[in-house]
Image (cartoon, grey):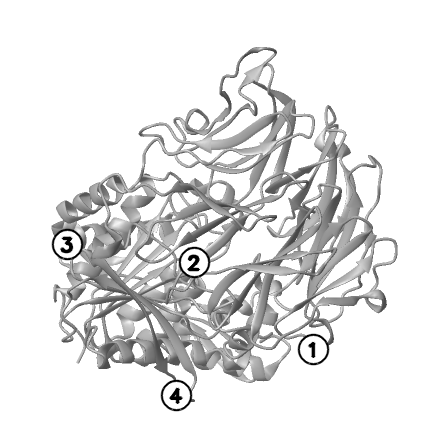
Amino acid sequence: MPERSSATPPLAEPRPLRRTVHGVTLVDEYAWLRAENWKEVLREPEALPADIRAYIEAENAWCDRLMKPTRSLQRELVKEMRGRIKEDDSELPQPDGPFLYYQRYRRGGEHPLICRKPRHGKTAGKPGREQIMLDADALAEDKEFFDLGDTAHSPDHRLLAWSADEAGSELYLIRVRDLASGKDLPDEIRDTSGEMIWTQDATAFVYVALDADHRPSRVLRHRLGTAQSEDELLYEEADPGLFVDIDETQSHRYLLISSSDHETSEVRMVDLALPADRPRLIAARQAGRQYSVEHHGDELLILTNADGAEDFKIVRAPIDAPSPERWVDLVPHKPGRLVLNHLCLRGRLIRMEREDGLPRIVIRDLASGDESAIAFAEEAYGLGMDAGYEFDTDHLRFIYASMARPAETFDYDMTTGARGLLKRQEVPSGHDPEAYVVRRIFATAKDGAKVPISLLHKRGLVLDGSAPCLLYGYGSYGSAMSASFRTRPLSLVDRGFVYAVAHIRGGTDKGWRWYLDGKRENKPNSFTDFIAAGEMLASEGYTAPGNIVAQGGSAGGMLMGAVANLAPELFAGIIAEVPFVDVLNTILDESLPLTPMEWPEWGDPIRDEAAFHWIRAYSPYDNIRAQAYPPILAMGGLTDPRVTYWEPAKWVARLRATMTGGGPVLLHTNMEAGHAGSAGRFDSLKETALAYAFAITAANGGWKRPT
């Protein structure tokens, strides 16, 4: 049981566990917080052992106690953030055959309604009416947690396959609804990743099953009306370091089965028009080679880094013989221009690419080779595309936003080049983009690299260093941070904060090399880039050292733990959401769901002694020092299969036992959710409000800062 009184934080009992790896003795005083039955806990949270539950609940109580003075502020923040959400918002309908499909929310609803209506406004000569195919609010009623996963209507428009997770552990149950009766069929498929793809005859769908270690490893075809035990195995991945995913080409002709990690991929295709078709390999896995596939006519168009194309290129290959020796460059590799993804619509190849840190969409006429681009001239913005359901179309939807400007959805006529505004994101409580300033500046890293920073602040802010700053970072897996519009940070910006995003190495913000320079033995670059970004913001007067609140989640939470160890004096506070902080112990544990797949990203410390030493040198849990730390808020989820609940719990316990001053250190564990936190669109605001109230308190000197 944790030691505590009403005036002191919980102190977890040290129960040292010793082991020797590569000649080094590792001592973990808090390994006992990892429940032996953690797999059972993912399914049944109440199975958590009593001593572990007592400690986590004591931490939650301590967090509640210290944050009690901010309760009115938290309520105010929730009200503000909710006021920026259009409660009865609706997606733009997407055409598919005779219907328009979309999702919308009812006023006050936490979860979406999955809907459709006749495409031409009438059905059998009568005015068309909306059909609510699935009411997720009703499905979530009386459940502590509910997350609607995927929905997929059948090609004949008679059925809707849908999936849901009711524990936060990402174990999805798939069901099928008869859209005429509104009732679900007897078919129930358990322990899936949540995605499903229909065969063209609508008699079966394909899904990915999770194994006993919570890894997506098997692809099966389920025929309606049969038991799950009778499902046909299409593919099983034997390598635990490769996870399996499914997709389909935009033509809807082929199912794509991908096995991949963070460096290597292998794809098989199945003809969805042939009910009994078996997977056909496109290109056998080759270490370091990645590729993804689209289909057009009698060709495959393949995005790949083959032949040294570090920033990727697009090749074409005959569909009946698509092996790599038949690949011919269509969009050649251009260093510094990272091709992010691609899709095909009839007669056209569309690609999303990023150059000089900014995205653009390029449309290529496959017959003539002519290209046109969609881009914007702002300093920092986000851009995305929505291909919809149909293949034979001249129209493409794209979404543009900046940090100050709400998202705008456009219809782009690929024949004429005309673009028409279809929808502008509404902010019901009001929003004036001209009241804000968006900037993109660059920090100089220790080795001279230029680190982009996107930032937002109120117009008229005096840049004398007095403003607090929330600095957000991630920097892993090649994920780039989009400079798009987010309504929640406005609650900080309107209170005088500078909101900044550091585009650190480990992401692909400046190309694939930017990613490589922030992974494995280069991982410390991510941390020093983030620190350089904070120092740059201070030197330019946007804020000051000791006035910055850092925020990051998951692998970005690892970043938070690392910078807390390296530069505690720079920060007024640190918010670490589902933080991957126990890196060495996790990557040494092959039984955890993600560990084998993670080795290409971090290194394999089991078999590679060098990897062991470089991970040990930065792993936040293993590098806690006897020093003062800034106030820290760690947030976890009990049923999180990605960053398990014990990582933030162990981190907080060791911090408390080691630090010589500063703090406080708080832990809040959501006992009813997993990696993404609360699933409801309003429920999740409470967690953001807790984090922002912590940031405001820290920035206002509510707790003593380290010296």
**75 to the left or right of 623:** left
Whether residue 224 sits left or right of residue 179 in the image: it is right
Quarter of the figure with the C terminus: bottom left
| Pointer 4 residue | 446
Does dot 4 land on a helix, a strand or a loop? Answer: loop
> Which residue is tagged 1?
308
Above or below 705: residue 8: above
SS at circle 3: loop
Front of the two marks 4 and 1: 1
Q: Earlier in the sequence, mark 3 or mark 4?
A: 3
Question: Mark 2 or mark 4, which has the lower sequence index?
Answer: 2
* Residue type at the position of mark 3: Ser
Q: Residue furthest front?
A: 416
Task: Tell which tag, 1 or 2, sits nearer the viewer.
Answer: 2
- N-terminal of the pair, mark 4 or mark 1, is 1
* Left or right placement of residue 87 versus residue 543 in this view: right
